[in-house]
Amino acid sequence: MAEEFKPQYNFTDDRLNELKQLFPEAWEDGVFNVDTLRSLIGDYSTDHSVKEHFGLNWVGKQDARKIASKPPTGTLKPAPGEGVNEENTENLFIEGDNLEVLKILRKSYMGKIKMIYIDPPYNTGNDFIYNDSFEDSTEDYLRKSGEKSEEGLLVSNPKTSGKYHANWLNFMYPRLRLAKDLLKDDGVIFISIGEDEIDNLTLLSKEIFGEENFLGCAARVSKKANNQGDFWSPNFDYVLTFAKSKNNVKPFFGGINTKEYKHQDESGHRKGELYQLIRLYMTSLDPLRGCNNQRYWIECPDGTYVIPPGKIFPKELKDGAFIPPATGDDKVWRWSYKSYLEKKEQLFIKKVKSSNLIDQDGNPAKWNVFTKTYLNDVITKSSAKPNSLIEEHINQKSSHELNELSIPFSFAKPSSLIKYLSEIMQIEKEDTVMDFFAGSASSGHSVIDLNSSDNGNRKFILVQLPEKIEEKSDAYKKGFRYINDISKKRLIHVIDKLDKTQGFKVFKQSASNIYKWKNFESQNDGLLPDLFSKIESAFKNPLVEGTTPEEFITEVILQEGFPLTANQTEDQDGIFKISHPWVPYTLYVSMLQSFKNIDLKALGLSETDHFVCLDMAFENNDALKQTVDNQCKLFTV
């Protein structure tokens, strides 16, 4: 029989399924036996008779856990026209409360994000945190963002508050818990944080990700030393780093300037690989080192010979070169003559306007000799690790790049910092980067920059609250009213400047398009007459008035676990076919109110396909409904 299409977010079931896989013995007749689990883990279980134990506890922790596991109440709606190259991009910019948005995305993107970078409020006493609620979260968000409430989307958290640290931890816990779900098994999260909460955040993150998955903490020079502060000049912040599973993460590498690898092989077995050219010529020679075998002739494509500057020797050649004795004034090659004979095919001899070499007649040479050094080889062989003191990516860099883009924004992280973190963890060209405190979109800027430098196809998912801009700010004076408008404008400018082929789509957090999924709240919606009116409307049409096919499809694909960028084609008028490699079945979606003139047999449905449509479309034709249900898994609204 056809099933009713219902919300399918169930975090509790996911957790229980994980336990069932790890401890199948603890399941008895479908019920989880805690005592059996305790016996299985032995000494690692907690003795509840002892109330004191090591761990981070604060007022409201239990509520924070409940908020993390509470399913979302809304959906996302596409905002066509607000992005760039929307038909050819998988980059996403989402406006909304990041906690709800993470919940909405969880089913589709669980285990799919390679890297998360976030720059949450540092909790200095002057920061604002999100005003989380146990109420219908999306309705509450829409009410506040629609300026129907004086509460606002953000609340201050002054140090004078009795729950100053607890409020901040309650705000961070559910977001980090969901972030872990979204990471791939070899994924990593980087969290920028100041000294006010570095200790608490470290303990909180160790609890969520596991102490064994702590990859370390780097200190970042945020600004040049100044005379501020009573004791130490506050010019550092920190980058906490955790893995989803440390055993699956490749070691970080550092000390490699990837910008130098600007050449690309166009053919051969290393086609597409990046390399840099390094001169074989070495400027100095220590006669005590015994470098007699590092000075020899090398033949060029035109038949002439070149050698580093120094005493000229006859051109009598042996095996293509003559090895003269070296003096303290002579320059040499980096390779010994033996290495040259073994690796001469790796040389790249290039005609140049100016060379440090001399030819067989003692004149400045027209050729120079280089070696090809491939980036992949350096990464593979490199044992260098990135320095835990990050000095190059100060906030001043961000100010400069934003000024160049005419974007007014203060306290943004430089895009070079996120690009650097992406490089040291070696994210692949098809990986996805997420930032759910997007701010001015530095993370999106970094992904666009990285792709433009190596022809990659990395994707970004950015989430930003439509936070109001202060009227006294430069941004307000330039016409910006919300932070998310600044984010989008920056992405548009960066794409125009760096790579016009890249783009992004915009989605916005919204209430459900399906009437019966919307909660009725008398304090917001009115009294019983409003309730009866909604029930009557739902009988006539289960969808909210004004719902477009694109909006309905978006809500359905998120419920079904498809990503927002899944392939969509209109198989027949009003019936859309959705597919994506992440999902093992094909989805058909329709919001037609009647199938009277539609040939459903032409769809070629299979038993693994899912078909979501309005129940009213069958017009009480139970035979037709049963026929479709026999062909596939039918869900009706």
Image: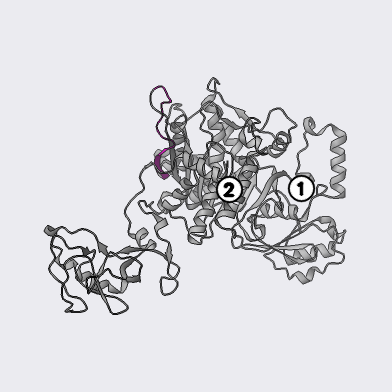
The amino acid pointed to by label 1 is Asn
Nearest to N terminus: mark 1 or mark 2: 2
Task: Return the residue at label 2.
Answer: 14
Which quadrant of the figure contains the N terminus?
A: bottom right
- What segment is highlighted magenta in the picture? 213-230
Residue 249 covered by magenta stretch: no
Foreground pick, 31 / 325 = 325
Secondary structure at numbered mark 1 = loop
The amino acid pointed to by label 2 is Asp
Q: Position of residue 376 (x, y in %)?
A: 39, 62
Q: Position of residue 132 (x, y in %)?
A: 63, 33
Left or right for 317, reference 185: left
Task: Say if residue 28 shows up in the picture.
Answer: no
Tell me the residue at 22%/78% (across/down): 320
Left or right for 434, reference 594: left
Tell me the residue at 39%/51% (across/down): 252
